[in-house]
Amino acid sequence: MCPAPAKRKTDIGAPHYDKFLPPIIKRNYGNWRHHELPRPGVVVHVAESGDKLYSVRAGSPRLLSIETLRLFAAIADEFSDGYLRFTSRNNVEFLLADPAKVDPLIARLKQEGYPVGGTGASITNIVHTQGWVHCNSAASDASGVVKSVMDELLPYFESMTLPARLRIAFACCLNMCGAVHCSDISILGMHRRPPKINHATLAKNCEIPTTIASCPTGAVRPATVDGKPSLEIIEEQCVLCGNCCAVCPSMSLNDPGDGISIWVGGKVSNARREPMFSKLAIPYLPNNPPRWPEVVSAVKNLVEVYAAHARRFERMGEWIERIGWPRFFKLTGIEFTKHHIDDFRHAGESFKRSVHLRRPPA
Amino acid sequence: MTEKKPTPLLDNLEAGPWPSFVKELKKSAKSPMVQDLLGVLERSYEDKMGHWKHGGLVGVRGYGGGVIGRYNELAREFPDAAEFHTVRINQPAGWFYTSDVIRTLCDIWERHGSGLTNFHGATGDIIFLGARTSEIEAVFGELIEAGFDLGGSGSCLRTPSCCCGMARCEWACYDTMALTYDLTQTFQDELHRPSFPYKFKIKSSGCPNDCVAAIARADLSIIGTWRDDIQVDRTAVTQYAAGGQIDIAADVVARCPAGCMTWDGRSIGIDNESCVRCMHCINAMPKALAPGKDRGATVLVGGKATILGGALLSSVLVPFLRMEPPYDDLKELIRAIWDLWGDHGKNRERVGEFIQRIGLGNFLEQIGLDPQPEMVAQPRTNPYISYEPKEGRP
Amino acid sequence: MGSMTVEQVAEAMYALVKECHGKRNLRATDLTKAMIDKIGAESCDKQMCKEAIRLLVDGGRCTYAYLGGSYIVLPPETC
């Protein structure tokens, strides 16, 4: 028996944010009057007191080395009295009270390779997951796809010329660690084959009843393999959710045939239309590292068709609702297939149950 | 010493204008852990598959959350990336930092880990990516000394997160950062010691624009709103009309989802009884319009992504709650939800799925809330009503 | 509360974790329900069980494990 460990400091929680707020924010906390977007990547917040706070936003790859964090810290020291923050979409923001430093800061960020933008009617940073860099259930790499897509879409990050903001999110499997289910464009890693089972280790690694109970469709059944207790999958019942793999490390969905699906028209904001889920646009594109050209061109096509046809303030989903799904598929040139028709629970809710059809096909 | 292996596929991603994660990896590659991580990732790019395993016993003593075990199945080939655990750290509310505290965090992580981070993870935590089991206690000890603690994982509460609220935004209908800090400190035990059927996330947005996606990503979504009339600055409206940057009739009035606005070319009219508080007109004319002064939040419950029973958006639980410290009503509600879900939730069943299984009506009854028409888009259309036995008697 | 102390609940809990070791993983909620069933609601409640779990884990006699959910298990043999 081990000796009882010594008592120690725990449960202190987060540091109080007050320690990290610039004086201009402390002075005007809760007393902001309005804001302006004078140019891409710069937001000016005007306080009731007349004070003006300049936030300069730059893109980051989310996966940051401590070298880069130290660079951000040094840039903050030089331009924003050491104050910086990160946005919910992994951009870095420098918080300036002195407008004279805005231009030099932007020049410095660009020189260091960090583009400035992501404000207003733009495409800001892609929220994404860990992918092959670090995740057990990833059906694709997150960082590589995001980098490839953003390299192509950079002009939309650095401008504010779209009809409305356009939010792109990437998740490397159906767990969706990120709001991909409610994004204008969602890029989602897909497994396509039922789990593979390591029968040699399963009995040691996994609780068989828990694993059976984890399946939403009853596709996981007990089996005896080579005299050892194990599991089997009824393939036609499996929906590839990966829940069994989460509770049993001896099962894995990872396969070279994994790939990517594209979803459109979701949003979380309540502005105008209520929040809505993203809907399937493209059921499968191959994993084609290092640059995923099929995914990049599919996303670019969606952005360009949306930019050309949507009206001002119309998010992707609002635009599609106005023109109708048949026209969306026609304009984007995406093929409508059997996979686009829901066949899971409550599937019927998405069937067309009226004759409100915009110019039916011949 | 780990031998440096060529990574031609990854090298391709150093080029191009968007900041490169491969450059980040290489900046940290003086760590043998990251050198081997590059090797593992290059292999994934070659064979188009991930090579990570999860789970296990890894963590700091006394906590069941905060460290996520990650093991590499190519450990024989890449031994320095064999263990590459994630450490989740409570972010300061609103994600504000000073350069000094960033450097403190970097120094700790340089001493004890790979040097790779996420600012921030999907839940909102600071993420240290790549710790060996043997270093976990040391990282934790130094973090605590620096004033930071671990976030949640497994069947724990996740670190609550929020938008920057009143720190910078004129639309914040309550102090999201104060609430988030308070909840984080109040629920340390639930954050660190897993006691739930599954994860539980709390996200707070200051207004219906919901910049932290609370409605989609949180089990409990606290979204700022107001009860009285939209504030109108008539002079500023006139300036917008004259400025030509916005067509008030087409871009504002015609886009109002409630159809509650009028514009006669000179003055704007709002039927505030019909307004659904969507924020569109305020977003479009931030100098002229503002949320009302009688402010608070709508509390919604049950949001989550696909796994397991399909994605859910949170739905209204309390139409309007004033958000003032010490937030007793909110905390009482949260505890009542945890109590019920803790007793009856199945393994890995999120609270939204639990509510679908037992019925929202039953859920409300159990946590002591009265049903209100604001909680539904419409009343039921099917007649399968479960009358109580006592209701069935003549 | 009745005659049971947190220490006594912790002992009963530890015995259950030991008995289930290698057969069934127990969650905090499983342990809590089992203790209240065994000891009786008049002598044991959720708060006591919470404190008992903390006593076991902080004392190093049990530890948390993650397997698609969080469980309370015996620690590995090494100190």
Image (cartoon, coloured by chain):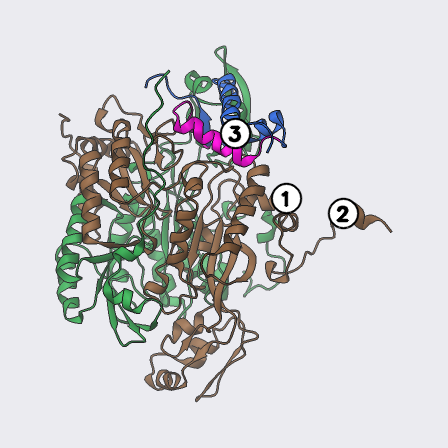
Chain colours: A green, B brown, C blue
Where residue B342 sits in the image (x, y, percent)?
Answer: 55, 39
Give the residue type that dot 2 points to. Answer: Glu
Of all residues, the one furthest to the right in this rendering is B394
Where residue B309 sits in the image (x, y, percent)?
Answer: 54, 42
Instruction: Answer with mark 1 or mark 2, whichever residue precedes in sequence.
Output: 1
Give the residue type that dot 1 points to. Answer: Ile
Dividing the picture into quadrants, the one containing residue A362 is bottom right
Question: In the rendered view, would you say A264 is above or below B277?
Answer: above
For the point 37% across and 74% down, the residue is: B286
Using the image, name the chain to which the residue with label 1 belongs.
B
Where residue B185 sits in the image (x, y, percent)?
Answer: 39, 48
Q: Label 1 crowding class (10 Å Cα cut-off): few <14, some 14-19, many 20+? A: few
**Residue indicated by mark 3:** A235
Q: Are marks 1 and 3 on the same chain?
A: no
Q: Secondary structure at mark 2?
A: loop
Residue stretch in magenta = C43-69
**For the residues carrying marks 2 and 3, which lies nearer the camera in this image?**
2
Q: Are marks 2 and 3 on the same chain?
A: no
**Residue indicated by mark 2:** B388
Question: In the rendered view, would you say B384 is above or below A355?
Answer: above
| Foreground pick, A148 / B105 | B105
Of all residues, the one furthest to the front in this rendering is C3
Using the image, name the chain to which the residue with label 3 belongs.
A
**Alpha-carbon distance for marks 2 and 3?**
42 Å
| Foreground pick, A356 / A99 | A99
**Alpha-carbon distance for marks 1 and 3?**
30 Å
**Alpha-carbon distance for marks 1 and 2?**
15 Å
**Residue indicated by mark 1:** B358
